[in-house]
Amino acid sequence: MMDTNTMILLGGLAIILGCLASAAYYFARYLFKTEDEIAAEKASQVTIAAVPEIPTLNQTMRGTRDGFWGKIQKQFVGASQIQGPELETLEELLYTSDLGTTTVERLLDSVENQLSRQDKKSLDVVKSSLKTEVEAILASVPKMGRSPFENFGARPKPQVWMIVGVNGVGKTTTIGKLEHLAAQ
């Protein structure tokens, strides 16, 4: 009959041998796969499709441009001059295009006060005036540099960042990431 120490020793040895056998089994299963397992693994792998062509900014903004300028075009076709009711319509179009009060007033002022009566008869001149004024507004916005965090600490607070993009491209996610980086 075996003594207690020998039984404990044999029990421990059995446990160790069992663990080693189990490890060897799983290791062998990982390294030595059957042809069916290899075929199933290949079938489950995702293939990368061809990357679609990235549209240019001009192509991306076509809908916005056509929408904004298209609305103006539709409203004023056949108008002999843009004044009175036409200016109210233009003001409404600018507000419904999500422009702020200050910007709308500045754009309307550029049409009302900077254009002559003759200029107001031409929709192209009015559009050109609006475009020039929008460019002047955007040119006055301070640029961030190569990185949004370049000289971040030296800039006055609070800061306003304009994030632009069509629906579903990740603007909100990017804003969250920028906020996290700015907080660091």
Image: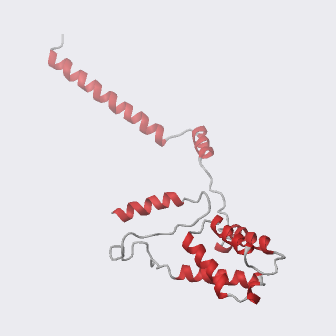
Instruction: Name the residue at the front extreme.
Output: 84
Instruction: Name the residue at the top extreme.
Output: 1
Q: Indicate whether 76 appears above or below 43.
A: below
At which x and y percent is residue 101? 56, 70
Q: Nearer the viewer, residue 131 or 62?
A: 131
Relative horizontal placement of residue 25, taking residue 135 as reference (left or right): left
Q: What's the image's color scheme?
A: secondary structure
Q: Is residue 4 visible?
A: yes
Q: Nearer the viewer, residue 150 or 95?
A: 95
Instruction: Name the residue at the right extreme.
Output: 78
Tally of marks? 0
The quarter holding residue 9 reads top left
Relative horizontal placement of residue 162, taking residue 167 as reference (left or right): left
At which x and y percent is residue 19? 33, 30
Q: Indicate whether 53 appears above or below 79.
A: above
At which x and y percent is residue 130? 66, 80
Q: Residue at x 43, y 74 (%)?
A: 147
- Rendered-image quadrant of the C terminus: bottom left
Relative horizontal placement of residue 145, taking residue 165 as reference (left or right): left
Q: Residue at x 49, y 79 (%)?
A: 141
Q: Residue at x 45, y 58 (%)?
A: 176
Q: Nearer the viewer, residue 31 or 82?
A: 82
Relative horizontal placement of residue 153, taking residue 134 as reference (left or right): left
Q: Indicate whether 15 appears above or below 109.
A: above
- Rendered-image quadrant of the N terminus: top left
The quarter holding residue 60 reads bottom right
Q: Residue at x 60, y 46 (%)?
A: 42
At which x and y percent is residue 105? 59, 75
Q: Is residue 60 visible?
A: no
